[in-house]
């Protein structure tokens, strides 16, 4: 007698029939519950923060609790209270439901007010970022709903007047600044969004700039598009630039205000701007090249003939979505995880687990894309410094789009909103920052037995969690997919407009491709670093490398057809510095040595590479001091909450480099302990004319798939598709 294929059936999976009434518009199921902060007074209290008045509808007051160490902790109680007009408003109690919930708008405002009250802000001080200090991993893992927890924020501050930067730790519950630590001399925080616009203004008002334009026959400076780039540190800086916070601005000229400036680069000038004084330091001048002749406009008003034969595709889920959202926690098809967001990384996933026959089994504690670098391959004097660390130097969360229903996301959508704070301390909401929805993804599994006539097929449903960031000319879409077979996939979609240079008549470049007449797109790479904190069936994990190799012909392989999968334990940090190898179909297995499956092997998950390429800059290139994390595809380090970013905390103008190459010099043990797995993957972009004027999406990423984690395929209990005219 055959045993049942699935002991636990899936619940709540709504069907997607092919023929059903379609709503007149795409549907959004909202972006969470309405905020109870609406209308809550937020004025700075005259004295120290005092206990709040009784809650509306609740006769008992609510106070902060204190843990055994005397630290302030939050309780998960939503509230709103009336405050008399004459009474100064207290600091807002946290509305966070969980220790990992990102800071709310009220908490960000409180952090700004607390620092202002204690004298850490002023006319010359800018706020680079404010983010949650995530509590200790052990306290998060043992947290229970309703139990208290701390709420602390890390603020990075830049004092332009003193030319100093610092980190401030703010205890939001006690309403105090816990500590302020100056950054070492020469360390620069990331570029702030305000600085981009301020640089453009500084360039436009510079007489040096006006003179340089006249020399090049550009008569309308208002049509010149100024594009600031992080300056980096390359060992060729002038003595007077030592310790100066700088940007290098490139220029493009439009033919009219909405024209695509990247079609006409003014290649012969680079403007160096001092960000402390917001003044042009100098203009570097290079041989003048004529402007390329053709426009490269992409907006719909410039495309007169759209396709007329494209029929609409409508997505409908008449029974609703199969996922549930409570606060920032998502549950779908046995998966459970939390959605987080930081100003630097953007989307973060927390506490990913899978319900296996009623048992919540942890898989990942935290997952994010923590760093990236885009090195350009042209050695020209005005070009070789184009190496953007878009996460560490700018911050993807600050550059996130507000996603549009029906365009960026399609179907029945849940949006997550996250607030952002600018350099002046103003908090603004980012609506629709993260999109959550289901997608049909073709066949999940299928088999036909020609002997018996049995045939079964299952459609694959995946859950997509995504956000999109615009970094100057490029767009990056970051997608995390959850599948019904227990797999997780990270996919990055690259689109937008290529950065361009000009070609003289008859000139070609060995370092790029002519994509339109006299318009060159340089070779470049997009290299990303994923930071994964695995917790495969528990906190102590190890990493095993698996290579498939052929067995030499001989007594053990007389017919020459044998090959084996060789397993190598990566026991120390330096043993775990590895590269992808398609010749051996290399992958890495994250295992829990203390948990065995029914076949006697450690339970595990498999890291499967997708498209990848090594950095093509030379190892001694100056940029590799900061981009040293790209020298290996895989790194494994012991888990440390302060080792968060592959290039270190402050790659902007860092003099020596930081991050993975520095940390791993200690060669710490990474076997059967709490670890962090770093996967570095890149796209090598040799441009095509078809990438102009807006590049069709290129995709790359990786998969994290169960490998001995389950007893058998966890997808067997997925129900068959609903019967329709096309499926029977």
Image (tube, rainbow, N blue to C red):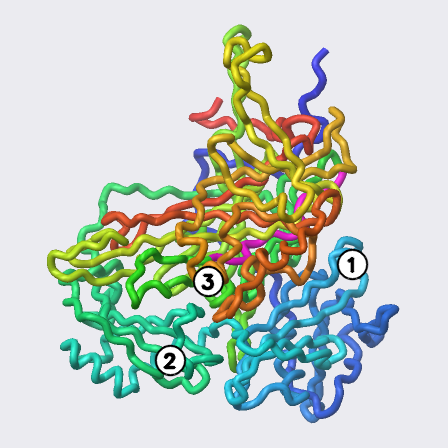
Report the side of 430 relative to 375 (left or right): right
Q: Which residues are magenta?
A: 359-372
Quarter assignment of residue 482: top right
**Residue 608 can be seen, yes or no:** yes
**On residue 139, which mark appears?**
1
Q: Which of 493 and 501 lies nearest the eye of the viewer?
A: 501
Q: Which of 282 and 469 lies nearest the eye of the viewer?
A: 282
Disc nearer the start of the sequence (2/3): 2
Number of residue marks: 3
- Taking 340 as reference, is 235 above or below it? below
Disc nearer the start of the sequence (2/1): 1
Question: How many residues crowd around disc 2 within 10 Å: few (fewer than 14), some, or many (20 or more)?
Answer: many
Quarter assignment of residue 151: bottom right
Q: Which residue is found at the position 25% from the left and 67% from the top?
A: 261
Query: Mostly what secondary structure, the magenta segment?
Result: strand
- Taking 487 as reference, is 473 above or below it? below
Q: Which residue is found at the position 32% from the left and 82% from the top?
A: 282
Farthest residue to the top: give it: 451
Report the side of 222 relative to 638 (left or right): left
Whole-angstrom CA distance, mark 2 to mark 1, is 45 Å
Report the side of 81 relative to 238 (left or right): right
Front tag of 2 and 1: 2
Disc nearer the start of the sequence (3/1): 1
Front tag of 3 and 1: 3
- Taking 337 as reference, is 39 above or below it? below
The residue that mark 3 highlights is: 389
Residue 618, horizontal then vertical, whole percent: 41, 53
Instruction: Answer whether residue 249 is magenta in the image.
Output: no
The residue that mark 2 highlights is: 273
Whole-angstrom CA distance, mark 2 to mark 3, is 19 Å
**Residue 486 can be seen, yes or no:** no
């Amino acid at each position: 007698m055959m045993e049942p294929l699935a002991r636990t059936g899936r619940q709540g999976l709504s069907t997607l029939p092919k023929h059903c009434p379609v709503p007149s518009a795409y549907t959004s199921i909202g972006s969470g519950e309405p905020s109870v902060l609406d209308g809550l007074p937020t004025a700075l209290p005259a004295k120290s923060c005092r206990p709040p008045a009784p809650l509306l509808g609740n006769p008992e007051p609510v106070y902060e609790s204190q843990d055994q160490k005397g630290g302030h902790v939050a309780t998960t109680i939503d509230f709103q209270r009336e405050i008399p007009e004459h009474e100064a408003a207290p600091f807002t109690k946290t509305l966070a439901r969980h220790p990992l919930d990102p800071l709310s708008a009220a908490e960000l405002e409180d952090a700004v007010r607390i620092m202002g009250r204690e004298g850490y802000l002023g006319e010359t001080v800018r706020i680079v970022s404010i983010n949650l200090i995530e509590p200790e991993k052990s306290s998060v893992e043992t947290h229970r709903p309703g139990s208290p927890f701390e709420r602390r924020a890390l603020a990075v501050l830049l004092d332009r007047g003193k030319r100093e930067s610092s980190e401030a730790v703010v205890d939001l519950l006690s309403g105090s600044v816990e500590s302020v630590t100056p950054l070492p001399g020469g360390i620069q925080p990331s570029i702030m969004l305000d600085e981009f616009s301020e640089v453009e203004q500084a360039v436009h008002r510079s007489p040096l700039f006006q003179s340089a334009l006249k020399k090049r026959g550009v008569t309308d400076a208002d049509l010149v598009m100024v594009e600031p780039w992080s300056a980096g540190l390359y060992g060729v800086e002038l003595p007077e630039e030592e310790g100066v916070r700088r940007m290098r601005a490139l220029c493009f000229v439009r033919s009219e205000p909405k024209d695509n400036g990247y079609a006409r680069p003014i290649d012969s000038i680079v403007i160096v701007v001092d960000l402390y004084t917001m003044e042009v330091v100098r203009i570097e001048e290079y041989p003048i090249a004529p402007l390329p002749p053709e426009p490269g406009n992409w907006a719909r008003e410039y495309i007169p003939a759209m396709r007329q034969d494209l029929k609409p595709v409508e997505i409908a889920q008449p029974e609703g979505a199969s996922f549930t959202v409570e606060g920032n926690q998502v549950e779908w098809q046995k998966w459970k995880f939390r959605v987080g967001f930081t100003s630097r990384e953007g989307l973060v996933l927390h506490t990913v687990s899978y319900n296996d026959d009623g048992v919540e089994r942890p898989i990942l504690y935290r997952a994010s894309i923590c760093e990236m670098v885009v090195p350009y391959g042209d050695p020209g004097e005005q070009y070789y410094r184009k190496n953007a660390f878009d996460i560490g130097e700018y911050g993807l969360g600050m550059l996130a789009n507000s996603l549009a229903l029906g365009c960026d996301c399609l179907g029945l959508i849940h949006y997550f909103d996250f607030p952002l704070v600018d350099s002046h301390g103003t908090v603004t909401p980012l609506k629709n920052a993260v999109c959550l929805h289901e997608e049909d993804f073709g066949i999940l599994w299928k088999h036909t037995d020609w002997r018996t006539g049995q045939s079964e097929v299952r459609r694959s449903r995946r859950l997509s969690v995504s956000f999109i960031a615009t970094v100057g000319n490029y767009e990056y879409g970051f997608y995390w997919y959850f599948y019904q077979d227990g797999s997780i996939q990270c996919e990055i979609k690259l689109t937008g407009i290529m950065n361009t240079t000009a070609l003289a008549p008859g000139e070609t470049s060995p370092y790029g491709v002519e994509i339109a007449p006299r318009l060159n797109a340089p070779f470049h790479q997009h290299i990303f670093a994923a930071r994964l904190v695995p917790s495969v069936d528990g906190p102590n994990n190890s990493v095993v490398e698996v290579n498939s190799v052929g067995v030499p012909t001989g007594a053990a392989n007389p017919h020459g057809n044998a090959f084996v999968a060789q397993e190598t334990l990566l026991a120390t940090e330096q043993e775990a510095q590895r590269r992808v190898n398609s010749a051996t179909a290399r992958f890495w297995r994250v295992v829990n040595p203390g948990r065995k499956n029914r076949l006697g092997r450690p339970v595990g998950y498999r890291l499967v590479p997708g498209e990848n390429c090594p950095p093509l800059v030379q190892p001694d290139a100056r940029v590799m001091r900061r981009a040293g994390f790209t020298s290996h595809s895989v790194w494994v380090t012991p888990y440390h909450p302060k080792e968060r970013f592959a290039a270190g905390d402050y790659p902007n103008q860092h003099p020596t480099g930081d991050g993975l190459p520095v940390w791993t010099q200690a060669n710490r043990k990474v076997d059967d302990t709490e670890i962090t797995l770093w996967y570095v993957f890149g796209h090598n972009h040799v441009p095509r004319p078809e990438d102009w004027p807006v590049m069709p999406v290129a995709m790359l990423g990786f998969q994290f798939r169960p490998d001995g984690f389950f007893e058998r395929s966890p997808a067997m209990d997925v129900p068959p598709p609903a019967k329709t005219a096309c499926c029977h």
